Image (cartoon, grey):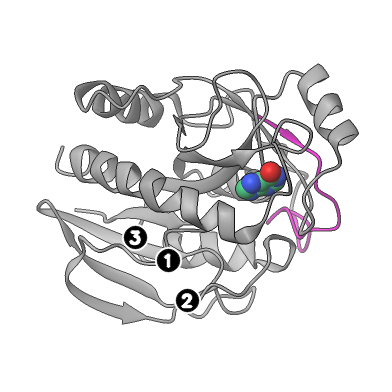
Amino acid sequence: MNPIGIIGGTGLTRLAQLAGQDSELVPTPYGAPSAALVRGVVGGRQVAFLARHGSPHRIPPHRVNYRANLWALHAAGVRRIIAVAAVGGITEGMDDGRVIIPDQVIDYTYGRAHTFFEEDLEEVVHVDFTEPYTPALRRELIAAARELGLDAAETGTYAATQGPRLESAAEVDRLERDGCHIVGMTAMPEAALARELELEYASVAVVANRAAGRADGEITMARIEATLVAGMERVGRLLERVLPQ
Ligand code: HPA
């Protein structure tokens, strides 16, 4: 059976549940992925885990080699990916530690290598991206979150910003006017590249902080990391629940 791919974000650089693991640095035509793929078993299910920001965590969002990461997972036989991401909460209810299974994305990033379809083409390719997250995989995540009573937000629009700095309050106001509920720095081009490789792709986002202008006081990495400890524990339970199916 094909392994399920898990891309871990800030707060999830390794999967504690992975049994019998081995790791392999998969070379790609796009260079090296962020880290070695760690393969193992969770709940009887083959898993290939990749730390998006490297292990240890030191590749900032705009420097992640998204093409190499997606290519490496595909080359390892992965056909379904669950992408874990830390985000800022914009709208009401998107509070610290809340889990969201986003259904839409708006891309505010720039200058990132964002497509496989640009060199040596026989024809121009435009993939459909109406539903950026694979509905069937989202449904599985939603069902598992309900079974666990996680009170996850079952829809949400993810604003993908360039980073690595956090946003200004006015930028977050604009994201809200655009219809975004959460803000992070990594969903794009990751989701689009997965679509170009015809991989199923869905995301579990965790609110690490209230976004700029909605938080009291400064947003610090120390606060983000402290919030993520509890949030990622929930994500771990969700992954354990969804994987054995
Ligand atoms: N903005 C963008 N990305 C983030 C944030 C934020 O407030 N928190 C965690 N990732």
| Residue 90, above or below 167 | above
Q: Position of residue 178 (x, y in %)?
A: 80, 20
**In magenta segment, residue 113:** yes
Q: Nearer the viewer, residue 59 or 137?
A: 59
User: Which numbered marker is on residue 62?
Assistant: none
Name the residue located 64 percent from the left edge and 23 percent from the top edge.
130
Q: Nearer the viewer, residue 68 or 106?
A: 106
Mark 2 highlights which residue?
55
**In magenta segment, residue 238:** no
Contact between labelled residues 2 and 1, with CB atoms less than 8 Å apart: yes
Image quadrant where residue 181 sits: top right
Q: Is residue 137 left or right of residue 10?
A: left
Q: Position of residue 149 (x, y in %)?
A: 25, 23
Q: Which of marks 1 and 2 is nearer the N terminus?
A: 1
| Residue 54, above or below 161 | below
Q: In this view, does 153 lie to the left or right of 186?
A: left
CA gap between label 2 and label 3 equals 22 Å
Helix, strand or loop under label 2: loop
Q: Is residue 43 left or right of residue 176?
A: left
Question: Start and end of the magenta stretch?
Answer: 105-121
Helix, strand or loop under label 3: loop
Amino acid on which disc 1 is placed: Thr
CA gap between label 1 and label 3 equals 21 Å
Mark 3 highlights which residue?
77
Amino acid on which disc 2 is placed: Ser
Amino acid on which disc 3 is placed: Gly
| CB of mark 3 near ligand 1 (< 8 Å) | no
- How would you rate the neighbour count of disc 2 (Cα within 10 Å): few for under 14, some for 14-19, many for 20 or more? some
Helix, strand or loop under label 1: loop
Name the residue located 73 percent from the left edge and 54 percent from the top edge.
114
Q: Earlier in the sequence, mark 2 or mark 3?
A: 2
| CB of mark 1 near ligand 1 (< 8 Å) | no
